[in-house]
Amino acid sequence: MKTSRKIVFVSALFLLAMVSKTTPAGSAVLKKLTFNSEPSGADVYIKRGLKEIHIGKTPLVYQIEFHSERSIVKILFRRSAHRSKTLEIDPTQKNVYVQLEQIPILSDPGRYNDKDLRRIHSSHHSMLNDLLPKLMAGQQNSNFELTGKLYFLKDRGKIYLVLPLEDTTKLKPKYLNPPEPFLEKLWQTINLEILAPLASELRKRGLVTGLIVDVQLTTSYYRTITKKKRVTTMQWVGGYERDWSSTTVKYIYNPFHHQVPVTRTERQVAAGTTRQSTGYARYSAALDLIARKKQPNQSLQGLNVLLVDGNGVQKFKQGILPDIEITPLE
């Protein structure tokens, strides 16, 4: 009886050791999860401290690494014109679903003192709230986000729709020099992705003259901090010396005659930081200049354009642009 108990006890210890060996406490756990959102097309990010790691758009199947069976991972869902939402998930979950609340993207009609602007706001309200989120979510070759609410502006008798955007691509400062090719390429991209279908809808109603597009730009560069260090080494120098193997007095040159100390200054990388600055590009264009074709002309001809860098320095200006006020999305 005692022998059988010993056998059972030893077998249990052996199994426990094998389980501990295969799944040690505190080891990382990989789990495949399915992410869905309403509406779909939301960007999904893993939050690691201050970092946000983009892993795709919903619907999405992705393998998440957890530090252990008890750890949690923060997942951020973000979609243009919708309130962002962060969820905490654990390894026991298989499906993650989130419903995002849509933010009104058109300013309150109470901001207008002009009756024409109030009338246009009323007639365009439903169309813009329905169309803009679709255009922002349907981008193929760009990543623009709405930074503020749309509103109508009257300038010198003309009615404009103001569209505040952000180019979430982190640009290198060199891309802005020279500024004109950059502004042409940026205009072409916005035109293809967003402005052309928007202008088409506005033309049907015949009340809006043009668009003012304000694009927030973030430039990013890595700055290294170096320190100087004086280093002294011994270096061989040549010299003449007596050739004692010769029967006559004779001197020969020896390239390794003696050593002398040589001091030099070396630069060593002590640290590095990423610097960012935010500027903007602003375009004003009549609806007739906004492309109706799939491949628009990227020329700035006929546009009013302004480019201001992150230090507030005006890098480019063409024509006259009205001052605008941007109301952030709530």
Image (cartoon, helix red, strand yellow):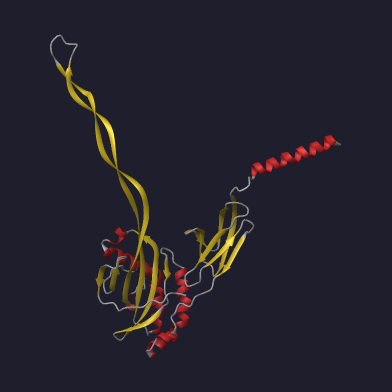
Can residue 294 be seen from the camera position used here? no
Q: Image check: 320 left or right of 13?
A: left
- Seen from this angle, which residue lies furthest left? 249
Residue at screen point 32% across, 48% down = 226
From the viewer's perspective, tell me whether residue 80 is left or right of residue 326: right
Q: Is residue 212 visible?
A: yes
Question: Which quadrant of the figure has residue 99?
Answer: bottom right
Q: Is residue 103 above or below residue 232?
A: below
Image location of residue 183, percent across then percent down: 30, 66
Residue 131 at x, y = what percent? 46, 76
Q: Nearer the viewer, residue 152 or 28?
A: 28
Q: Is residue 45 above or below residue 289?
A: above
Q: Is 72 in front, or is 156?
A: 72
Q: Nearer the viewer, residue 36 or 52?
A: 52
Residue drawn at x 28%, y 70% as measured from the top left: 300
Q: Quadrant of the N terminus?
A: top right
What residue lies at 34% left-to-right and 51% top-to-bottom?
224
Q: In the image, what residue occupies the spot 62% across and 59% down?
A: 94
Marker count (numbered): 0
